[in-house]
Amino acid sequence: MKTFLIVVIFNTILAGGYKDSYVFTSPKFDSFTACVEGANDPVLIRKMTARLVVEYQGSQNKEIEKVVCAEKEEIEKLLNESIGIDT
């Protein structure tokens, strides 16, 4: 069974041309459609925004470029491939 997560992609370019991003490991969704619905839920948006404020406190405001839903397995694959890349 596939699991989908919400990923926030910021309008910040890191070293090597990579985009700064944040993966919400919770909540998890059983379908892409459920993930999109969650990403558009006003209550969840407030919770995610509060989490980003805590995570990035003290740094300059980060402009969000987009919010996407992605398969957990694909996210893990990309993260594993990026190990050792200087960002």
Image (spheres, rainbow, N blue to C red):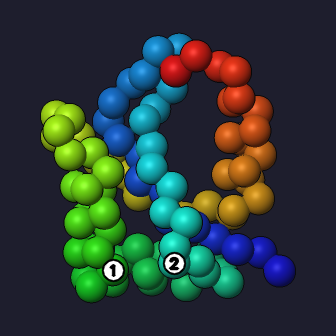
Residue located 32% across and 51% down the image: 55
Q: Quadrant of residue 70?
A: bottom right
First in sequence: mark 2 or mark 1? 2
* Apparent side of residue 43 relative to residue 21 in the rendered image (left or right): left
Residue 86 lies, in percent from the top left, at 58, 16
Toward the viewer: 64 or 27?
27
- Label 2 sits on residue: 27
- Label 1 sits on residue: 44
Whether residue 29 can be seen here: yes
Residue 8 lies, in percent from the top left, at 41, 53
Whether residue 17 can be seen here: no
Q: Residue furthest right?
A: 1
Which part of the image, by quadrant, shows the N terminus?
bottom right
Residue located 44% across and 81% down the image: 38
Q: Quadrant of residue 81?
A: top right
Residue type indicated by callout 2? Pro
Residue 83 lies, in percent from the top left, at 71, 29
Q: Is residue 15 above or below residue 2?
A: above
**Contact (CB < 8 A) between labels 2 and 1?**
yes
Other-residue count near label 1 (Cα within 10 Å), few / some / many at <14 / 14–19 / ≥20? some
* Apparent side of residue 35 relative to residue 9 in the rendered image (left or right): right
Residue located 49% across and 63% down the image: 24
Question: Which secondary structure lies at badge 2?
Answer: strand
* Apparent side of residue 45 relative to residue 14 in the rendered image (left or right): left
Label at residue 7: none
Question: Which secondary structure lies at badge 1?
Answer: helix
